Image (spheres, rainbow, N blue to C red):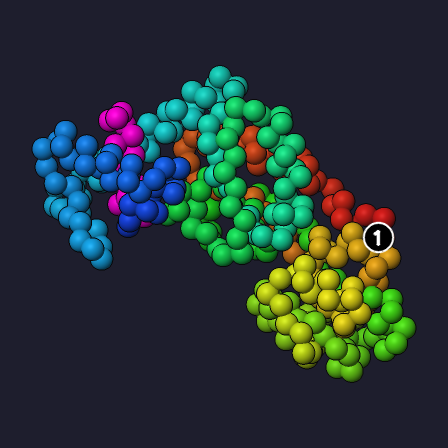
Amino acid sequence: MDRLDCDRMFVAVTDAGSFASAAERLGTSSGQASKLVSKLEADLGVQLIKRTTRALHLTEVGRAYYERMKALLDEFDALDASVRHASGAPAGRLRLTAPMTFGTLQLGPVLFDFARAFPDIQLDVGFTDRVVNLVDEGFDAAVRIGVPDNSSLIARKLCDARIVVVASPGYLALRGTPQVPADLSAHDCIIDSNFRDPLNWQFLADGGKPVSVAVSGRLRFSNGEACTAAAEAGLGVTRVPSFIAGPRIKSGHLQPILGDVECDPIGVYALYPPAKHLALKVRTLVDFLANCFRGKPSWDQDW
């Protein structure tokens, strides 16, 4: 066992609070994680971590060793990144987190192209709608929708995502087409509970003044794809990002409505922790994403 691997695992276990979480972060098993830390303790001749059935606690010497070793590993990684950057060869494992629907529908195909272009990078991508703590959970970068809440992260805007109101042509023929936002009160609205205020839909009135309209409906999903599919099935009107609805609008299965009072688009961002020397693999990914998503997004074209 390499001593550096032991030190990395000890720091990861301390940061994550468990062997299982640290093992997942570093791509190994919890048994191997325990072996690495035990080997480190044996080499040093001291106990670094007190283990109980419920929790892990650093010993006094373990706390001192952790603080020094974490700083040394950060310096080592910075040096490694600067050398790799100078060599011009991005390589290594790159952990990325992204929203589920945007990730599978729009980001996935771009990452396939990235993987073909940079065969020495091992991509480890997690799709989740949970806001992941990049530093604590060991991720290199994230793609997120909306203005970033964490000001400690570096954010680079990739593109805009429109929020559109849509319904099937059949539903509109049967129930009529809303002409102003207030008309939605007479319609079956399909609620996407991923929005912060899902029962109040935002629009822009004359002069760009924000207007909030209360809506209701018997269908509610915590997934924009499900909302879009329900609207396509003629079950009502829904409000979803255009990167979900766009292909169905192009095909004619959905019709956009109230476009003249559509709210401002929300941004799609790449985020990564600040570093003295940003790893070349991370910079390469962010640049690649920015290049692929620049201009008017493909899902908003031709409709």
Q: Residue furthest right?
A: 173
Residue at x 52%, y 19% (from the top left corner)? 88
Q: Determine whether, in the image, residue 209 is placed left or right of residue 5.
A: right
SS of the residue at dot 1? helix
Front residue of this view, candidates 197 and 22: 22
Q: Determine whether, in the image, residue 222 is placed left or right of residue 235.
A: left
Q: Measured from the top left, where is residue 269 in percent x and y? A: 59, 47
Dominant secondary structure (helix, strand or loop) of the stretch shown in magenta: helix
Q: Residue furthest bottom?
A: 186
Front residue of this view, candidates 84 and 188: 188
Q: Determine whether, in the image, residue 109 is placed left or right of residue 118.
A: right
Q: Measured from the top left, where is residue 93 in percent x and y? A: 46, 32
Q: Is residue 147 above or below residue 213?
A: above
Residue 34 in sight in this render = yes
Q: Quadrant of residue 24?
A: top left
Residue 263 in sight in this render = no
Q: Measured from the top left, where is residue 194 in percent x and y? A: 59, 64
Residue at x 22%, y 57% (from the top left corner)? 54
Is 76 inside the magenta-drawn segment? no
Q: Residue furthest left?
A: 45
Q: Amino acid at mark 1?
A: Lys
Q: Quadrant of residue 254?
A: bottom right
Residue at x 58%, y 25% (from the top left corner)? 118
Residue under circle 1?
Answer: 250
Residue at x 35%, y 47% (from the top left corner)? 21
Q: Badge 1, how many Cα within 10 Å: few under 14, some, many 20+?
A: some
Is 11 inside the magenta-drawn segment? yes
Specify the segment rendered in magenta.
1-16
User: In the rendered view of the protein, which quadrant contains the N terminus?
Assistant: top left
Q: Measured from the top left, where is residue 293 in percent x and y? A: 68, 41
